[in-house]
Amino acid sequence: MEINGIGKDVSSGYIDGRLDRLEQCLKYYSELGYTVAEVPITGLSVVVNGKLLSSPVQRVTEILAKYDFRYTVHAPNRTNLAYGYNHHLEKSVLTASIEFCQIIGAKRLVYHSGLQALDAAHTDTAMLPSDDDLQRGKEQEINALIDLAPIAADAEVVIGLENGDPHLWEYAVLQQNSRQPHELAKYHARLRIAPIIEQLEAVNHPNIGMTLDLAHLHLATHALGDDYLAAVEEASPWVRHLHINDNFGKLDVGFNNEQDRLPYGEADLHLPIGWAAIPFAEAFARLKDYQGDIILEIKDRYWDYFGEALQNTKQILERDA
């Protein structure tokens, strides 16, 4: 692995449009020794109804310029080019996110792969999609990414499709629709690496790659009974950006807040590196050709341990050097 820098994500929920909190985060991360910061579209109020707003963009840009970070950007989690409720708007939001990347000089834009088709059924706004619906969604996302690829290239941005993690509510949706638990990967295909690779092969453009989330993959492979390290190796040739945090590979049992889940080690806890069970050294060994940044996506309740997480990550990388 050739790591350019280790970064920390800025929590959308924590800043929630408060630019004083954005500055607080950046100042703290800089003092701890991080060299990259990943900023969230949803936390900055820079994209409204699919368009950039000049006033917040200017104010955010001025704050970012105060710090010697290389920046990456995370698109809204809900953006979905395959199964979103308004495809034109979904595409506009991602286009605006690319434009924001260009303005702040970010070279990586994280986009959650659209291969998750359960949201509408979960909110009772639509039926569970048919096989034809699933295929049309996949094709729609491919075509949208083909359209967006040259825009990203002009902005010198690589869009990284991120893999997903399973949730108890998804199994509940399957049950409510008389489907079996083993069908989850049909409706949430981004749990596995192969369907994302199929998308990338179809798009076939250097500015469309993969954001590999090692924590999401740890949960997904445990839920599906797959081999974790084999999945990391499968992703390796396509990875252009890397997200890490720690967890135990355990599905939640219906408790949604951190206070209830943490004592039991359940779900996507976003723990500091070294606190749980992900075999990072072994995973990194499967990513030996990766060149880029590592972003630590750690929840704000562990604010006091962000420095420890950075040092633990450096130690793992140094052992493998």
Image: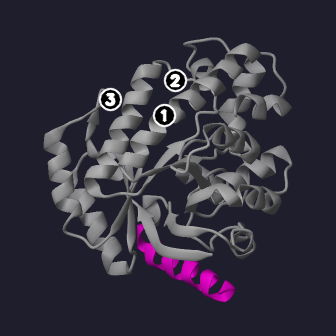
Q: Quadrant of residue 227?
A: bottom right
Label drawn at residue 78: 1
Q: How many marks?
A: 3
Q: Amino acid at mark 2?
A: Gly
Q: Magenta residues: mostly which secondary structure?
A: helix
- Mark 3 sits on what residue? 50
Q: Position of residue 253 (x, y in %)?
A: 70, 41
Left or right: 147, with 62 as reference point: right
- Mark 2 sits on what residue? 84
Q: Secondary structure at mark 1?
A: loop
Residue shown at 37% from the left, 47% from the top: 154
Instruction: State which mark lies toward you, 1 or 3.
Output: 3
- What segment carries the magenta color? 303-321
Q: Quadrant of the N terminus?
A: bottom right
The reply to whether the C-beta atoms of the residues labelled 1 and 3 are less than 8 Å apart is no
Q: Position of residue 201 (x, y in %)?
A: 68, 42
Q: Amino acid at mark 1?
A: Arg
Q: Secondary structure at mark 3?
A: loop
Q: Position of residue 233 (x, y in %)?
A: 76, 61
> Alpha carbon of mark 2 to alpha carbon of mark 3: how far?
13 Å
Does the magenta segment cover residue 306? yes
Compared to residue 69, the image places residue 32 above or below, namely below
Residue shown at 44% from the left, 27% from the top: 90
Whichever of labels 2 and 1 marks the residue nearer the N terminus, that label is 1
Q: Residues within 10 Å of mark 2 (few under 14, many from 20)?
A: many
The reply to whether the C-beta atoms of the residues labelled 2 and 1 are less than 8 Å apart is yes
Colouring scheme, one of rainbow, by chain, secondary structure, one colour: one colour
> Alpha carbon of mark 1 to alpha carbon of mark 3: how far?
13 Å
Compared to residue 46, the image places residue 265 above or below, namely below
Instruction: State which mark lies toward you, 2 or 1.
Output: 2
